[in-house]
Amino acid sequence: MNIAIITACPSGVANSIIAAGLLDKAAKELNLDAKIECQSKVIEGYILSEHDIDATELVIIASDTSIDTSRFKDKNVFQGSIKDAVKNAAEFIENAQKNAVKLTSDAVFTSNEQSSDSKKIVAITACPTGVAHTFMAAEALEEEATRQGHQIKVETRGSVGAKNQLTEQDIEQADLVIIAADIDVPLDRFNGKLLYRTKTGPALKKTKQEIDKAFLEATPYQATGGASAEVSTENKGVYQHLMTGVSHMLPVVVAGGLIIALSFVFGIEAFKQEGTLAAALMSIGGGSAFALMIPVLAGYIAFSIADRPGLAPGLVGGMLASTLGAGFLGGIAAGFIAGYSAKFIADKLSLPQSMEALKPILIIPFVATLFTGLVMIYVVGSPVAATMSGLENFLNTMGAGNAVMLGILLGAMMCFDLGGPVNKAAYAFGVGLLASQQYAPMAAIMAAGMVPALGMGLATFIAKSKFESSAQEAGKASFVLGLCFISEGAIPFAAKDPMRVIPCCMAGGALTGALSMLFGAQLLAPHGGLFVLLIPNAISPVLMYLVAIAAGTAITGFSYAFLKKRDEQVLASA
């Protein structure tokens, strides 16, 4: 029997791909010849041709979003929830064979009947690194809103820029705006709309609660014109300002670190020979990219606090922190001094209407930059520089015992909340030290951060009988995410079983961090996972670094496999 299968989820990211794989496998087991069309924003899948449709006897749609079915007129068509397809693919196909109906007119299948309570929602998700939480939160919001019968469109502001961007028409027609962001995002375009703010963590883990709260607590948003004073710092904490700075600094650090590593291909000291390619690479990576790290960090912390008027004083304060030897701690201080001084001037200084336009482009940058510079030179610079010098001396002279203890602490922090504030605090510490040529803590941090997702993937493999089929598929995805240094791959497991998953992850992460520090591993680039190995000398020593990661992964994977209880679905089918 020839069948055609279409899978589609609201975000077009994970569930579409997972369901397509499971249904394809089930169709083969049932001796069916299936053509699969996976509607995804991530991969370019196969599109059913007219010949495929003419030859098919049954069209199966696994979707939680609207699907245009006009091309299937006069065909036997069945539609069901993509969650049912993932739960039991074979049963889903058998149910389709029994309950398919002939499509007699052009139509659009929808996953939920739109009721009078249906609302149109637009949302934005953004996290500091712009990788995992951004897209996972988007998918969670889309799935939950669709389940409740609402229409939703989510703009993701990730590391590659804004995707699925909201149009003016989308915003105009929206009944509600949800901002799930850990960093600053521009909000001018939502002036007058009902708006609710949250973070990616709650949007991902408590999605229903957050959407319900959004309808109850959303308030009309009022932009203040000029600078996007929509920043609304009273609703943002120190952590969010800091993460805004870190997120903008990260691409500079990654680019600089990898280019420095390339210069080492020609020899560790080859860059000292003027006029060589190694010297040019070091000038780009170390002399330019790394020189911008602290100014960018400070500038965007200030930008998060005071928006554009804070950027100039923040950049200048960061540059002063760098030249004074105050390092990343000085950059953080400069960012907050510049941001809050600029915001104070903006809020407190009243000028005649004819001169008001000069505030954001002349008065605030001038006064805030002068104030920040003087404070950095005469008050903050020297004490913070002494603190940084002491920290560097400690890191340079610490014995094996201290190194191991630091590795244990950083490793456990990376695995405690899987991309949350504790994880990001450890990460920001390691990234900041790169500007001071301290590469060992960053190595321990990245290695430990890979362990949770790798460990969950390993657990689903060695204790396959304890996990339902959807969890086994999630384990495969988790393992790949772990290789890429995306700790968030373990979140689906931690959300279901936190009392077992988190301790197992922390144990593995602590071991990996300790071994990385003990082996003296150094990492020049703060992201990329094992793919950084493609850059010579970006990680050293490579073999022992891999041993550290493998040891932590084994501890996490085997311990959770032992402690894990069988999933209810597995027990029911036993």
Image (cartoon, helix red, strand yellow):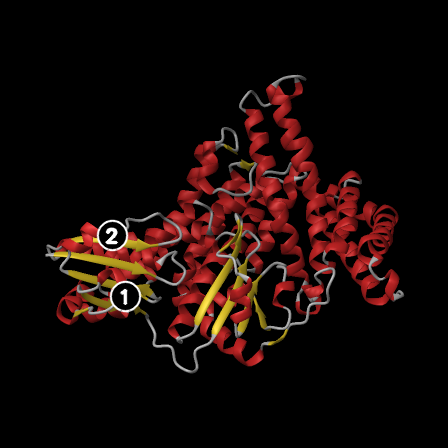
Could you tell me residue 382's position as x and y percent? 83, 45
**Are there few (<14), some (14-19), or many (20+) residues within 10 Å of tag 2?**
some
- Secondary structure of the residue carrying tag 2 is loop
- Spatial CA distance of label 2 from label 1 is 39 Å
Residue placed under numbered mark 1 in the picture: 566
The N terminus - image quarter: bottom left
Q: Residue at x 51, y 64 (%)?
A: 201
Contact? badges 2 and 1 (CB < 8 Å): no
Tell me where residue 237 sits by quadrant: bottom right
Position of residue 67 in the picture relative to residue 358 (left or right): left
What amino acid type should be assigned to the residue bearing mark 2? Leu
Q: Nearer the viewer, residue 46 or 148?
A: 46
Position of residue 554 in the picture relative to residue 80 (left or right): right
Q: Residue at x 59, y 38 (%)?
A: 439
Tell me where residue 289 sits by quadrant: top right
Could you tell me residue 262's position as x and y percent? 55, 27
Q: Nearer the viewer, residue 479 or 556?
A: 479
Residue placed under numbered mark 2 in the picture: 48
Position of residue 390 in the picture relative to residue 451 (left or right): right
Q: Is residue 269 above or below residue 541?
A: above
Q: Nearer the viewer, residue 416 or 97?
A: 97
**Are there few (<14), some (14-19), or many (20+) residues within 10 Å of tag 1?**
some
The C terminus - image quarter: bottom left
- Secondary structure of the residue carrying tag 1 is loop
Say how many tags the image has.
2
Could you tell me residue 486's position as x and y percent? 46, 50
Q: Residue at x 43, y 74 (%)?
A: 150
N-term mark: 2 or 1 = 2
Could you tell me residue 572's position as x and y percent? 21, 71
Q: Is residue 191 visible?
A: yes
